């Protein structure tokens, strides 16, 4: 095993020297001897020859190395051929891709321009409809505010009527209790609350009643009670009639608003539908334009990427070709070294021995 490694090292050392076929065996070995590693190998070879090592073993290994170098070159040739076919396929695909992106860029540019023109026309038309909608909505808002004010007034007055009727009913109950003989002191708290509530309303209708109740508070007599009960009944009847009148007015105004708002809403619906149609068209136009612009950007990037990939592939192919040629040249040089070393070892072994003997005397 050690002997095989020694012989292999000799070949490597010889491969490091650049030789010419006109050199003598001694000159060849002298070149190997100049290299530090080659010097060490020749020392080992010298020792092997001195001990009587068989030259045939060296020849066998040199033959194996030459065979391996030839095998490596065949593999390299096969890989090179395969890479060349693959490269040509890649180049063809990239060129086809570049042509496709160029066609897409032209089509997308035309789509963007024509859609932009259609968008301008739709935007002009939608502004007119938008103005009509604004006028319609203002009319609806004004009329709706008027109607709401009417309704709020009715709600407030109706609530006032309800409170007043409740106060009248409470006053009637208190007076009836007094008529039944209940002491005023027991009803004083309720009496004062009702009196205060009637005075808060500031309604002219209640003035005679308030005066009568005030007198009743100081002196309770049956005649005054009967008079107050009659007055309470009259006032309640008037309040009920007034409330009914307010309700009738509210219902009439509500019915009128129902008709008026219906017309405004129908007109608004027609305008909104028209605007929606135009706006939908505008949105679609803008989407189309945006997509066209984005696709243009993408196609431009794709085109640049494809062009860059083509350039990269071409550089890679050039590098692979250069590497293949360099490795092929190196193997040719190595084979030449092996052949010449074989020649030295087979035909001129005496010259090699003489060189090694002189080398031993010198070194």
Image (cartoon, grey):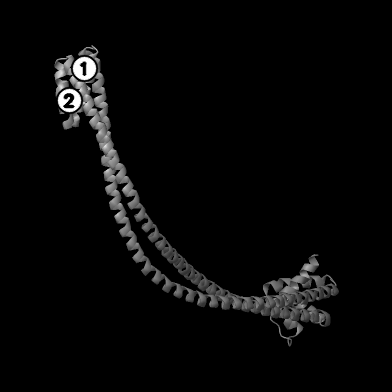
Q: Specify the quadrant of the image occupied by residue 233.
A: top left
Whether residue 10 is visible here, answered yes or no, is yes
Task: Tell me the residue at 34%/51% (across/down).
Answer: 259
Q: Nearer the viewer, residue 76 or 90?
A: 90
Residue under label 2? 209
What whole-number distance in Å separates the C-alpha atoms at marks 1 and 2? Answer: 17 Å
- The relative height of residue 243 versus residue 292 in the rendered view (above or below) is above
Q: Residues within 10 Å of mark 1 (few under 14, many from 20)?
A: few
Instruction: Depth check: give the residue in front, 323 or 96.
Output: 96
For residue 56, above or below residue 256:
below
Left or right of 27? Residue 104 is left
**In the rendered view, does 181 fall on the left or right side of 77?**
left
Q: Position of residue 6 (x, y in %)?
A: 77, 69
- Compared across the picture, whether 75 is left or right of 293 comes to right
Contact between labelled residues 2 and 1, with CB atoms less than 8 Å apart = no
Q: Which residue is rendered at x = 37% and y = 54% of the image?
A: 265
Residue that carries the numbered disc 1 in the rendered image: 188
Image point 24% across, 32% down: which residue?
Answer: 239
**322, 156: nearer the viewer:** 156
Q: Quadrant of residue 277?
A: bottom left
Can residue 362 be seen in the rendering of this structure?
no
């Amino acid at each position: 095993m050690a002997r095989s490694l020694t012989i292999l090292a000799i070949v490597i050392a010889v491969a490091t020297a650049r030789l010419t076929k006109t050199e003598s065996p001694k000159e060849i070995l002298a070149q190997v001897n100049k290299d530090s590693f080659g010097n060490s190998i020749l020392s080992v070879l010298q020792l092997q020859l001195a001990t009587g090592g068989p030259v045939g073993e060296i020849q066998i290994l040199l033959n194996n190395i030459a065979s391996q170098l030839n095998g490596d070159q065949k593999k390299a040739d096969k890989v090179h051929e395969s890479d060349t076919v693959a490269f040509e396929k890649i180049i063809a695909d990239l060129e086809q891709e570049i042509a496709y992106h160029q066609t897409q860029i032209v089509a997308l540019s035309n789509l963007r321009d024509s859609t932009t023109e259609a968008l301008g026309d739709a935007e002009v038309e939608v502004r007119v409809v938008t103005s009509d909608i604004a006028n319609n909505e203002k009319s609806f808002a004004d009329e709706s505010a008027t109607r709401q004010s009417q309704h709020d007034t009715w709600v407030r007055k109706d609530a006032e009527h309800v409170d007043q009727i409740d106060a009248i009913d409470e006053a009637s109950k208190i007076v009836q209790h007094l008529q039944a003989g209940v002491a005023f002191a027991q009803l004083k708290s309720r009496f004062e609350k009702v009196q205060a509530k009637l005075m808060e309303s500031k309604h002219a209708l209640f003035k005679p009643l308030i005066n009568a109740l005030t007198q009743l508070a100081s002196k309770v007599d049956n005649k005054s009670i009967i008079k107050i009960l009659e007055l309470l009944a009259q006032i309640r009847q008037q309040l009920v009639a007034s409330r009914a009148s307010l309700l009738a007015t509210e219902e009439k105004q509500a019915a009128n608003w129902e008709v008026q708002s219906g017309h405004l809403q129908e007109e608004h619906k027609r305008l909104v539908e028209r605007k929606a149609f135009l706006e939908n068209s505008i949105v679609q136009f803008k989407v189309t334009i945006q997509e066209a612009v984005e696709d243009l950007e993408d196609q431009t990037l794709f085109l640049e990427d494809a062009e860059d990939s083509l350039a990269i592939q071409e550089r890679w192919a050039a590098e692979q070709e250069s590497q293949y040629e360099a490795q092929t040249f190196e193997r040719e040089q190595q084979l030449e070294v092996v052949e010449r070393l074989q020649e030295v070892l087979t035909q001129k072994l005496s010259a090699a021995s003489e060189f090694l003997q002189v080398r031993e005397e010198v070194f």
